[in-house]
Image: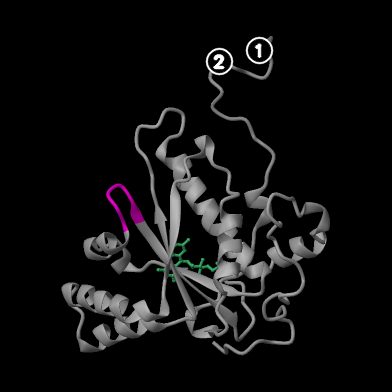
Amino acid sequence: MDASPSHDDPPVGIPRTSTTPHAPDGQTACAAVPRREALAALAQRHSVGPRWLTDPAPDDADLRRAIACALRAPDHGLLRPWRAVLVGREQRRLLGDLFASIARDQGGDEAAIAREIERAERGPALVAWIARIQPGIDDVPAHEQWMTTGGALTLFLSALHLMGYGAKTLSGRKCSHPRLQAAFCTPGETLVAFITVGTPSRAAAARGCDDLDFHWQPWQPQNLGGAGPSAPH
Ligand SMILES: Cc1cc2nc3c(=O)[nH]c(=O)nc-3n(C[C@H](O)[C@H](O)[C@H](O)COP(=O)(O)O)c2cc1C
């Protein structure tokens, strides 16, 4: 498939100057945000693969802004069931060695091992997303904590997009490998995926069509048992 952007493609990223989702300390920025513009930009968020991500990477301040937005994910019981860690540029080689050792474990040949080493080097910034799901919490079952973890990741990606960055979340088979899990997690945590972040060198493209009418419908009551529509209240 031709990877070059067409004339119909949305602009590459959103200009950094358009709006910041970050409120100054202790304030709400809502009134200042051009909401329709932000909404239109959000509706254009698509992942941008590592090979299309170039410098500059988001600096520490922008990454903190994105994490501040991630912390706005709805969170039953305020359990904060996730955290994110930055893999520094100088740590990529170490990560590459780890990826390579896992590829070896998984029976990869020399080409596969070299690919894994190269993967660890890809992309201007690399963030690991870690879930901290607590079993046995009254009223907050694990699936609700996973929802919060995914919601936080989505807000993180959305905030980066609104600041003009591109990103892609990738796990792959290796993410669940015990050695990689051990390198990032404390007991009870799960390494979910890595997010590569940078400046898009091409427009992000939608992978498919959205079927809004499937995802948003009025309730069609079913399996009501004794609670029929005419039951008196
Ligand atoms: C936790 C998580 C892990 C993912 N891992 C992979 C992966 O290993 N390989 C892959 O091709 N896509 C993976 N994806 C999907 C991509 O990140 C991306 O969402 C997908 O390509 C759809 O693109 P879009 O974000 O533009 O809709 C993962 C997504 C999530 C949320």
Neighbor class of circle 1 (other Cα within 10 Å; few <14, some 14-19, many 20+) is few
Residue at numbered disc 2? 226
Q: Amino acid at mark 1?
A: Ala
Q: Residue at x 64, y 81 (%)?
A: 203
**Left or right of 183, for residue 169:** right
Q: Name the residue beneath numbered marker 1.
A: 231
Q: Position of residue 224 (x, y in %)?
A: 56, 23
Q: Does dot 2 land on a helix, a strand or a loop?
A: loop
Q: Quadrant of the C terminus?
A: top right
The answer to whether the residue bearing label 2 lies less than 8 angstroms from the nearest atom of ligand 1 is no
Q: Residue at x 29, y 53 (%)?
A: 186
Residue 187 in magenta stretch? yes
Write the residue at 66% across / 36% down.
219
Asked whether 222 or 174 is in front, the reply is: 174
What is the spatial separation of the Cα atoms under label 1 and label 2, in whole angstroms? Answer: 8 Å
Label 2 neighbour load within 10 Å: few <14, some 14-19, many 20+: few
Which colour assignment does the render follow? one colour
Looking at the rendering, the stretch of residues picked out in magenta corresponds to 185-190
Marks 1 and 2, the one that precedes in the sequence = 2
Mark 1 CB near ligand 1 (8 Å cut): no
Q: Residue at x 61, y 90 (%)?
A: 4
| Proximity of marks 1 and 2: CB atoms separated by less than 8 Å | yes
Q: Quadrant of the N terminus?
A: bottom right
